[in-house]
Amino acid sequence: MTSRIQSASPAGPHGNGSGQPPYPAVESADGLAPVPAAGLGELHDTARRIAANVERVLVGKPDVIRIALVTLLAEGHLLVEDVPGVGKTSLAKALARSIDCTVSRVQFTPDLLPSDVTGVSIYNRQTGEFEFRPGPVFANIVVGDEINRASPKTQSALLECMEEHQVTVDTSTYTLDGPFMVIATQNPIEMEGTYALPEAQRDRFTARVSIGYPDQQAELAMVDEHSGHNPLADLAPVSDRETILRLIGTVRGVHIAPEVRRYAVDVVSATRQVPEIRLGASPRATLHLVRAARAQAALSGRDYVVPDDLHTVAVPVLAHRLVLTTEAHAARRSATDVVRAVLHRVPVPQGSAR
């Protein structure tokens, strides 16, 4: 569905209409000095190199890789849900290795404790004081493998750091360096030995993607290229954290017209009024939808958002947050079906906004 709205980027704090700086600055990785935002040209070039790097590992899934990049640039977190063996962990590790930053990996198991994720205070006999030992969450990119195999108690260890970019242990609060992104994989909840993610946990993930099985040509290419060699072993970074911070500043400066903002609110509000939905999308979902639409627009080479950007990211951003009624499950309706129906029902803004 294509809208006729043309939301020109105004001169001022958001840009000059040309896609070039000025854009809002973001904090540096050490939080000490602001990092100037990049232009759309640098963003497109960097995103292309990262995507090409990831495609060496995950063959034939450009749409999935694009959503991963959208989530990264929107300062969000990504949930990759699918059956075993389709490349969930490979996607997460390939994206992490494509950026020269700190990376950690957590294998979620039923006996994993919250302190195994956040860190723990250990008593030092020599000094007579407790010393904090940071956990794997203290990294720029945290890969959580099979997150729903741990108990909800352990899953909840990620709640504070995902939302507030900080960790509180024994009354002390520790700030996480930016950029910070959690890439979690999970198996479908029908599989043995899994726990459903709590609603609060799912709501903190900006987007959810399912990789799906590759087509025959992609699977044949994968067999030819990967059967005797692991491409992850040769994957080298093509960007660094300072560059990603600059690109995030670019995305923050992408203009979104009042009509498009209202459209985003209308779409999210409509999910709360559908009879098949027991729990609709939250106000946090609206913020994530707008941020993801900004990133999608920037990746498309524009410094303004159009309704098509919202349509592109709506299903990955909204579907995993919805809780269906028993009747909807019985009718074999999915959250994806509901989001698409809402997009068809809510009027798209028409005209010009400047």
Image (cartoon, grey):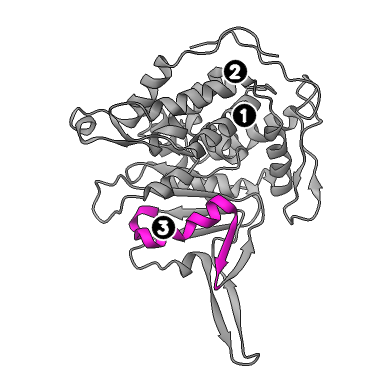
In the image shown, does 145 or 56 lie closer to the viewer?
A: 145
Which of marks 3 and 1 precedes in the sequence?
A: 3
* Residues at discs 1 and 3 in contact (Cβ within 8 Å): no
- Residue on which the image places disc 2: 259
Q: CA distance from mark 1 to mark 2?
A: 14 Å
The residue that disc 3 covers is: 155
Q: Taking 293 as reference, is 190 left or right?
A: left
Q: For the residue carrying disc 3, how many other residues have a C-alpha within 10 Å: few (<14), some (14-19), or many (20+)? A: many
Mark 2, secondary structure of its residue: helix
> Which amino acid type is marked by label 3?
Gln
Residue depicted at x 46% and y 31%: 61
The residue shown at (66%, 13%) is 353
Name the residue tied to disc 1: 294
3D distance between C-alphas at marks 1 and 3: 29 Å
The rendered magenta stretch, by its main secondary structure, is classed as helix
Q: Amino acid at mark 1?
A: Arg
Residue at x 55%, y 22% (from the top left corner): 262
| Residue 257 visible here | yes
Hey, which quadrant is residue 250 in on the image?
Answer: top right
Query: In the picture shown, does residue 192 fall above or below 77?
Result: below
Give x and y (percent) for residue 92.
50, 47
Residue type beneath disc 2: Glu
| In this rendering, the label closer to the viewer, 3 or 2 | 2
Q: Which span of residues is magenta-colored?
A: 146-170
Tell which tag, 1 or 2, sits nearer the viewer: 2
Give the SS element for disc 3.
Answer: helix
Residue 222 in the image, given as x and y percentages of width and height = 43, 37
x and y percent of residue 347 in the render? 47, 13
